[in-house]
Image (spheres, helix red, strand yellow):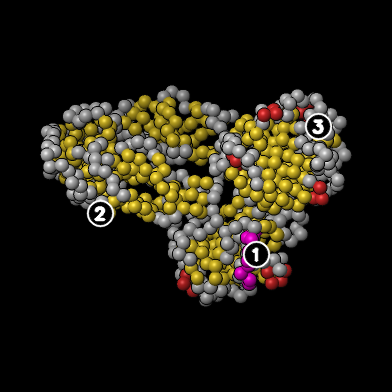
Amino acid sequence: MKRLLVLAILLFQFLPDCPAQTTNSVIIFEDIASLPELCPPTNLGISVNDDCILLDFEIEGTNCGTFIGINVYINGEFIGTFEDEYEICEITPGYYNLYITALYEEGESEPSNMINFEMIGDFPFFDDFENYNPGQQLACQNPNDWTTLNYLPCTYQDPFITDSIAYSGTLSIILVDSNDLVKTLNDLTTGRYKISFKMFIPEGSYGYFTTLQKFEGYNSLWGMQVFFNEDGNGLIVCPSAIPFHYNYNTWNNNDIIIDLDHDIAKYFHNNVFIEEWCWSYGGGWAGINQLAGSEFYPWTSVQQGTGKYYIDDYQIEQLAPLMVEPPENLQVNPLNEDLILTWSSPYDGIWLQYDNGNFGNGINAGGAPIYIAARFSPEDIEDLDGMFLTAIKFFAQNNDCIYSLRVWTGENATNTILEQDVLNFIPYSWNIVELNNPVLLDVSEELWIGNVCSSINYWDFYAACDDGPAISNKGDMFSIDGINWESMSIGYGLNYNWNIRGLIQENTDLVEIEASGSQITSPNKYKDNPINSKSFLGYNIYSSINEGSFEMLDFTEDTSYIYPDPLPGKLYSFYVTSIYDEGESTPSDTVSILISGNKEVINSELEIKIFPNPVGQQLFINSDAEMNRITVYDITGRTVLTNDNLKTFEFILDTEVLKSGLCFINVKTSGQPFIKRFVRK
């Protein structure tokens, strides 16, 4: 994490009888052009083998320091120092980023390039039951992947393979009587996963399954239960009881998405969203944020009737993590006797949209491609002349769909301006796709923003919409051929808006995008809220004092915060995170502010080079700008070294007079001063 340091001086009243403290210091000037460089690693690469990664890199330079090894950082956290072998093992499944630094006797180098990688582990897992013998029990044939609730394959709880019906191929499994089948996982605690399977329930029968937080036989904990009761009435309990409808005598699709990183779970039946809940509380108690597997049980009882159903095409896959961007440009400055924190949302822009941020349902066209669009008249966008459409955000309601983005202009979407296929997307989630060729807005004609989806499955409800009400002839336009358009609410009584949005920015060189921006919901009405989508909630503010641990300070929906009455002699550090329905972002840059008794404000990014750090008797300092004055503060903000009239670019500072601990060096140039931390050993 990049760290910024601010030295700020507030006016505080000290006791008059406190004696002034002075320290004599000696500055030694030497030519340091021949000193060794802290050469950073380059060309970092990795190879993945099971749960291990092997690092490969180069160090280039003719005057590098005395090499010790490398420091490894994964997801911004220091993992360890590796001196001889560069292999890291026992990495759990998930998505990671990694960089390294070179460690020398003279200090630590700047970071290498960053590598993003995925640890697959045992995923994906797929079983269509075609490799088993019909008439024999499943776990008995494959005890490595399947077991029973009593841990006894080949006994009464182990279901049989059948060739009487199948979704794909010729075989499936049948659950009847006292069968109780379990697909175990390795107690996953991180990552985002999707469990999918097909389920066939004969008319007059019942079904039931659970997804487990912990598997310990009859002491197992479940994170959700799904009942398939009489007359096609389904019920998910997680812990709220949410009803839905299912069909007898046909294959029903079930999808469970579990995000362990954010403790969120979602259930979809036949590709229709049913419910979202806090995964660890899905059992109705304070459970655990862990994924242990699936359980299938026929649930035969007097109240429920006869349990009997078939399962086919069981699959577990690991999904990409939800990307939620942190706030940017965090600054901390004095404000009278307080501190004011300010920051910005992940980017600047305006969302053009009519949907209300909710995902309400999906709509299909019987397997035919369907074009959807939000239509904006010249009056809607008249204030955006000369700006660019840079990205499109849409809800991907189906994982089998082939999505292609579209931008049209003119009355009735006459002119096709952009066609861009979506090569990768996260199913059952919002996706933001940056346009390869941003569209310059012409506010003299209509702007249509949409997509087209093709699906091979007749029953896929692949076009996502909100829960209404529709803004007719605006947010609900659709077409079967991309030529003739209709209003969904006027023509068919479907009172919804499509989950489709466009990002408008002033230029095409802005920072990364995320679910943020302003929103248009009616002509000439721009909402002031800089972040207006269902996923965004606000910001968490974290602070620490004197390099202690960070603790959450407060939550706010604003992009500023007042920290009251900081104490003199303390070092305050802050960072801010963005909070979404989907979870919490990574931290912003950390900014520190040292409260002292001086009467000036010094604000600077870290731009000088000092080494070694930690330091013993001599600290080498190199600056691109001519240095005029050097001041060193201890952790309390007390000045312990001062050197004026230097007029040099390089020097060596005698640090033997300093006490052990954290210090701050302030280098004054003709421009802004530079601030850096170092540790006196």
Which residues are the magenta region?
464-473
Checking the image for residue 336, the label placed there is: 2
Q: Which secondary structure, mark 1? A: loop
Residue at (12%, 42%) from the top-left corner?
Answer: 16
The residue type indicated by label 3 comes to: Ser
Callout 3 secondary element:
loop
| Quadrant where the C terminus is found in the figure | top left
State the image coordinates of residue 655 (x, y, percent, origin top left): 20, 31
Image coordinates for residue 45, horizontal then vertical, percent: 49, 35
Local packing at callout 3 (Cα closer than 10 Å; few below 14, some 14-19, many 20+) is: some
At x 26% / y 43%, what residue is drawn?
Answer: 567
Q: Earlier in the sequence, mark 1 or mark 3?
A: 3
Q: Which quadrant of the rendered structure holds the N terminus?
A: top left
The residue mark sitting in front, 1 or 3, is: 3
Distance from Cα at disc 2 to Cα at disc 3: 73 Å
Mark 1 touching mark 3, by CB under 8 A?
A: no
Res. 496 mark: 1
Front residue of 85 and 463: 463
Tag shown at residue 178: 3
State left or right for residue 620 relative to residue 584: left
- Which of the pair 608/593 is nearer the observer? 593
Q: Please, what is the three-letter code of the amino acid marked with disc 1?
A: Tyr
